[in-house]
Image: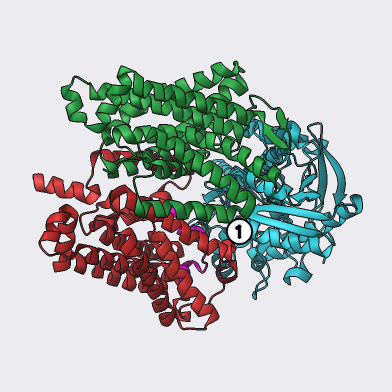
Amino acid sequence: MFSLAMFGQALVNGVSLSAIYVLIALGFTLLFGIMRVVNFAHGAFAMFGGYALFFAYGQYQLPYAVAIMGSALLVASAGLIFEYLVVRWFYHKMFQSMIGLMGLNMAMVFTGVIVWDAHERSIPAAASEVLFVGDLVIPADRVVVLGVAIVVLFLFWMFISKTKYGLAMRAASQDVEIAGTQGINARRVYQVAFFIAIFMTALAGSLYSQVYALSPFVGERILMVAFVVVILGGMGSIPGAALGGILLGLSESFLSTFFGSAVSTFVTFGAVILLLIVRPWGILGEPE
Amino acid sequence: MLVIWPIFTSNQFLFTMASMVLLSAIGAASLNLIIRTGHVSLAHAGFMGIGAYGCVLTQMYMGWSFPLALIFGCLLSGLVALAVGPIILRLTGKYFVLITFMLGEIIRMIFIEWKSLTGGSNGLGNFPPIHPIFESSINFYYLALVVSVLCVALCWRILTSELGRAIDSMREAEKVALCSGVPVIKIKILIFVIGCVLVAIQGAFQAHLIKFVDPTSFNDLASLNFVVMNVIGGMFHVAGPLIGTIFISLFPELLRDYVDYQRVIFGVVLIIVMAALPGGIVGTFARLRGKK
Amino acid sequence: MFSTRILRRVLFLFMFTAWSIVRAQTPEELKIGVIAPLSGGGTAWGLALQRGAQLAVDEVMAKGGLKIGNKVYAPKLVVFDSQYTAAGGRVAAERLISVEKVKFIIGPIGSPEVLGALPVTMKSETLMLSNGFAVPILKNPENSPYNFRVLNTSVEFGRVMVKWYRENYPKSKKVAMIGPNDSVGQMVVPQMAEVYKSQGFEVWSELYERGSKEFTPILLRMIAQKVDLFDLAGNAPSEVGLMIRQARQSGYKGHIWQAGGPAVDEAIAIAGKLSEGYMSFNVFDFDNPKAANFVKAYRAKYGSGVINAQTPIWHNATHMLFESMRRSGGTDVKAVRDSLEKLDGFEGGLVGPVSWGGLAEYGVNHQLLHEFLIVEVRDGKIVTRATITPQKR
């Protein structure tokens, strides 16, 4: 069982898992970092992204790149409406935001059930070939996800560290009042941050739904993953999301392959609990 | 009034629903104790499960009578709370929420994986009843009433006593309380253990009401329900969790025909309550009365 | 004056007669309870139950109502969500019985909800046509007087299917099973493991936490075991398609089938071309001309999504209930129950003639043994390889 070929394949699987996990966690950690909001509706927005892609790519058959970007943009724009109606009442209010956003999640998910029915659907794959590299088997659609993850991570990092808006967002996340005295419009910054976060979340959701399957309940697992990745890597930290995603993806792949899924789950949970006890702000996070 | 109404009807459904509401009130009130110390626990249903399985298993396999089995279930829950309490109660805010969430999941997974003991996902049925008298819904209702009143009264006594004042001071200004000589962490552990023991009582009785124990009754959604009961009813008033329990338990029954719409409305209600009514239902009434 | 009196009397007599005739023809409402999981994990099956039963009711109403004896009834479904939990099943049953005053219930589906509802329905002598794989549902000290199981469980079809596989693929030696650790998986996987072992197979099995969609690590683990057959028994339709797709994408070349489900349509929908060669237990052939009307009615009412294969089963169960009422001449529960027990041979129209069995396994003949199929996916279409009627035991 412990052969080089198995090891290699577990690595390939782990990397593809990591890509998905990183994408899922990015939007989540951004919202926490800037607005200190634990977005319990994260899964629901991801689910909307999935349905948007389903219609854009599956039904209307737009070219893939257009479909992916377009659907994420659409959901992010719709997200701004939710931001205006619901989310902005909860900034910097930890506890209320949790329950309030849970309510938003429930409302969104079951609206999805009413509109789209509960059954699972499939979104046609962007690339259905399977690549064979030596002994290794690499499905092409996972490579697409990996590619998107890398591009998005890079673009986002550039935005945050190099552009004025990025700088404004970081300033607002550290101290919103002082940032205000420097002429930064907190409201505008939050809206931009929210837009970007939902864009990434919808993108992650559409890719996730494409690789797996789409239903109104697809967000449950997505939210769990986001939590674990962000706790591991550090809440509010972008490099933390990347690190957490890689750690979770690789460990799940290796542990499940060689020791079974129960072991993998227990170890993951154990690691998270240990981290919460010893270093709750995550590996790359900062204590508050 | 709670004692008299059953005389006027013979509707079994009402008795069962009422018993469920009464038992849930124990869970909500006991969680309220823990919340008052500043910690929101998402593991509460897990401890309810420990009480349920502890009681039922000793009845089934050791032939113990219900009172003895009940005490065992509570002790087991209390011991687990005592073991993990000192570790997790050092965390605050969202970290405590997250770690109790994980704890709840671990407890649930143990229920599922330890098939030989707990019957796994297929649960346990066919265990000896509390006593043949309580097979009738109306008698069980009175039993639930007595138990529930006792437990809630205990919570109320704690909250209105010297201990209760210490708890409030801890929540509002922990460092100041420490300096005043309040043994903060010890009290937190004590309250956490008491809360977990009380919800174990609910678990044992509820198992006998439904005559079935399975892991899905003790999952994160069940824990979340207790939190929502507290939040909607009002966390900082004694009556809060009780009002919340009634609301959460009965709301689904009002909209039985439209499950999906029900959930959507529920979600919207949560948003509105959280955004606009932070004190919950009870808190809002208190504010309105105060204003007048 | 004499004539107006007579006229008045004749008029009155005429109106009274007319009124009686009209009253006899106006159907009396007959409430039938339905308990189904309409939220949470079992929603796909819950909808199958609700829709199947409703289509049966629609058919009866289209023919002018349910004629029992010399009265006409208008059956009406009262549907409650059980949320796939024991407490949910219990509360739904209580409300149906105590508040809605129903005497007949169709459903629930999952073992926990059935076990939650049983104490109440048994005590109140309410007739239930339900599912649930757990053995104590039928095998209990009271001999399950009012509960009937209307779907084959792996006990009924597992052995026959494995024997069929052995005969057709004698070279296969090792089988793998990957299932969820919920109530279905934990019951079905060990049961089927025993069946395989008794037929000389070597068995490897693993259970996963329900909710996960990523099976490649476990599948990689399975492929390392070098198995000939991969059985998806116990998996929900949503996971079946993903497992097939991911298994093939991971390079697994052996047989894949499900001695359970069925979830063939879902498999084709999700796994697409990769479902080629997939075999499965199936209860219904949607391409059969007999099914055409059913499919048309379903599509007209419920849209174009996948029709869950449990739908015709519940449609059949509802018709069985109606027929038992007709034969017993009324709506008395004990009489209807006795009729139901003697319904062998009745054709509900979609799943073959009724046959009750299960005496050897459960102590009472309340297990429906309906005809089933072993099918294979070829070119995206479902092809029947064998039609099997379980033996009465």
* Residue C299 percent across, percent down from the top left: 67, 32
- Please identify the residue farthest to the left as the structure is shown: B292
* Residue B83 percent across, percent down from the top left: 36, 68
Left/right placement of residue C280 relative to residue B194 reads right
Q: Residue at x 44, y 68 (%)?
A: B50
Q: Chain of mark 1?
A: C
Asked if residue C330 is positioned above or below residue A236 in the image, the reply reads below
Asked if residue C134 is positioned above or below residue C219 in the image, the reply reads below
Helix, strand or loop for the magenta stretch, by majority: helix
* Chain A, colour shown: green
* Residue A107 percent across, percent down from the top left: 42, 37
Look at the image and give the residue range highlighted in magenta: B207-220
Q: Residue at x 70, y 43 (%)?
A: A5
Residue at the disc numbered 1: C183
Instruction: Kindly identify the amino acid type of the residue bearing the numbered disc 1.
Output: Ser
Which type of secondary structure does the marked residue at label 1 adopt? helix
Magenta span contains residue B212? yes
Which chain appears red?
B
Q: Quadrant of residue B275?
A: top left
Is residue C44 visible in the rendered image? The answer is yes
Asked if residue C358 is positioned above or below residue C28 in the image, the reply reads below
Magenta span contains residue A162? no
* Chain C, colour shown: cyan
Is residue C87 visible in the rendered image? The answer is no
Asked if residue A49 is positioned above or below residue C376 in the image, the reply reads above
Classify 10 Å Cα crowding around label 1: few (below 14), some (14-19), many (20 and above). many
Say which of C54 and C314 sits in front.
C314
